[in-house]
């Protein structure tokens, strides 16, 4: 089963809608995958868009004698960095609406929900 199929998208959709006071939303069919993350756009009925960034399962490939990366710590640092930059600079930095670093959460993967800026 693929990662895309294991994620409980309906749970993430409910979380997103609840954070926007019940505004309905759905996920775009398109998605992007990098080495560490999968990204999908969340479209709300009122025209607002967010981005859902989900951490892919850790690769079992060797890192040599290095320890496997601590995913929760990495995500916490990324979120703290975004919040710090948002507070300190005038450049657009994604606003974090919700996140979970727990791979056993109800969604089935660590995730970050951020505002989508127009490009």
Image: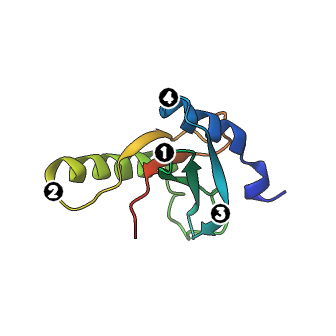
Inter-mark Cα distance, 4 to 2: 29 Å
Instruction: Identify whether 87 is placed above or below 18.
Output: below
* Residue holding disc 4: 21
**Do the residues under discs 2 and 1 have CB atoms within 8 angstroms?**
no
Inter-mark Cα distance, 1 to 4: 28 Å
Q: Earlier in the sequence, mark 2 or mark 1?
A: 1
Q: Earlier in the sequence, mark 1 or mark 4?
A: 4
Inter-mark Cα distance, 2 to 1: 26 Å
Give the total of numbered labels: 4
Question: Which secondary structure lies at badge 4?
Answer: loop
Please indicate, yes or no, whether residue 54 appears anywhere in the rendered image.
no
Could you say which disc has been placed on residue 89 in the image?
2
Q: Kindly indicate the quadrant of the structure image that contains residue 34.
A: bottom right
Inter-mark Cα distance, 3 to 2: 35 Å
* Residue holding disc 1: 72
Instruction: Identify whether 42 is placed above or below 63.
Output: above
* Residue holding disc 3: 59
Inter-mark Cα distance, 3 to 1: 15 Å
């Amino acid at each position: 089963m693929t990662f895309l199929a294991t994620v409980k998208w309906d749970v993430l959709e409910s979380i997103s809608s609840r954070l926007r006071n019940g505004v309905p939303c759905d996920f775009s069919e398109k998605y992007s995958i990098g080495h560490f993350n999968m990204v999908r756009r969340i479209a709300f009925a009122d025209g607002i868009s967010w981005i859902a960034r989900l951490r892919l399962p850790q690769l079992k490939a060797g890192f040599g004698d290095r320890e496997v990366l601590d995913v929760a710590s990495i995500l916490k640092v990324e979120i703290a960095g975004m919040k710090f930059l948002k507070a300190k600079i005038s450049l657009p930095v994604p606003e974090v609406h919700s996140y979970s670093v727990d791979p056993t959460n109800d969604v089935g993967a660590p995730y970050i929900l951020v505002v989508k800026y127009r490009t």
